[in-house]
Image (cartoon, helix red, strand yellow):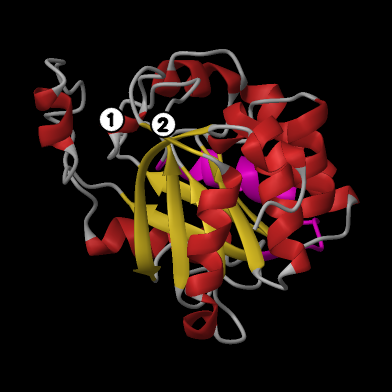
Amino acid sequence: MLLNPYMNEILKIHSVESFGTNDGPGIRLVIFLQGCNIKCLYCQNADTIPRKGGQIKTPDELLKRAINMKSYFGKQGGVTVSGGEPLLQSKALIPFFEALREQKIHTNIDTNGTVINSYSIKLISELADLVMFDIKNATPEGFVKLVGQPLFHQSEKMIALREKSNKPFWIRYVLVPGFTDFSEHLRIIGEKYGKYKNIKRFQVLPYHKLGLYKWELLGEKYQLEHTPENTKEQIEVAKNILKEYFENVI
């Protein structure tokens, strides 16, 4: 089902999950791309960070798989592209998303929002039905400390671009004790994005260490080994602060 020659572009895939329920609304085909431009200290999928490796797939191959699952998607489900960082492969994602739109299949991108070029801008502002932005930190300094790259303002720009496009998006925020759980940081985020009209959900993600073994398999030391997981009270405090600014806090 080769809809246009650009469907022969290649995508580097880490893995594909059928019937995903945690990566957007409804039942979803979740495609994890290989390679990321940042290195979060708490990354739960550290094996997706290296740009080398992965399976080679064409958008056409992935489209056929999505069409085969179409009956399971229902009214809410669809395809989510995650990673790694999917916007690194924006050029090849464009024909894929265009083809999914023709098939009336809902699309979602799970991104850190720090890759800015003509292809990623088109995906974020035009093609994706939903975008889930993973905000890493409330300040530029905290951002660098947590992910190792000075890309804080790129993320701000892409979120603003999505808001301007008048299309829905979610914000996701990992609550890492000692890094992202400060009340003043939560209020900075609230003051900055609370006025945005197209944020449909703010999702607080508790910090956990389920991906620690992946760092060990890569032969790397997990830097947050001694960082405690959140207590229920800490999560509730964060949620209550964010509810002052956002209508739908999960």
Q: Nearer the viewer, residue 124 or 2?
A: 2
Q: Nearer the viewer, residue 142 or 110?
A: 110
Per the image, the residue denoted by label 1 is: 46
Query: Can you say whether 169 is above or below 159 in the image?
Result: below
| Residue at the image point whose x is 33% and y is 40% from the top | 176
Q: Which amino acid type is marked by label 1?
A: Ala
The dot on residue 34 is: 2
Quarter of the picture holding the N terminus: bottom right
Q: Which amino acid type is marked by label 2?
A: Gln
Q: Residue 149, how many percent across, how many down?
A: 51, 13
Which residue is most to the front? Answer: 1
Query: Can you say whether 121 is above or below 23 in the image?
Result: above
Question: Does residue 163 appear to the left or right of 129 in the view shown?
Answer: right
Question: Does residue 69 appear to the left or right of 67 in the view shown?
Answer: left
| Residue at the image point whose x is 22% and y is 47% from the top | 208
| Residue at the image point whose x is 67% and y is 61% from the top | 245
Instruction: Determine the CA span between mark 1 and mark 2.
Output: 10 Å
Task: Name the mark nearer the viewer: 1 or 2.
Answer: 2
Residue 197 part of the magenta segment: yes
Q: State the SS at label 1.
A: helix
Residue 112 part of the magenta segment: no
Q: Nearer the viewer, residue 29 or 95?
A: 95
Q: Residue 221, how many percent across, how many down?
A: 14, 17
Image: magenta residue range: 181-200
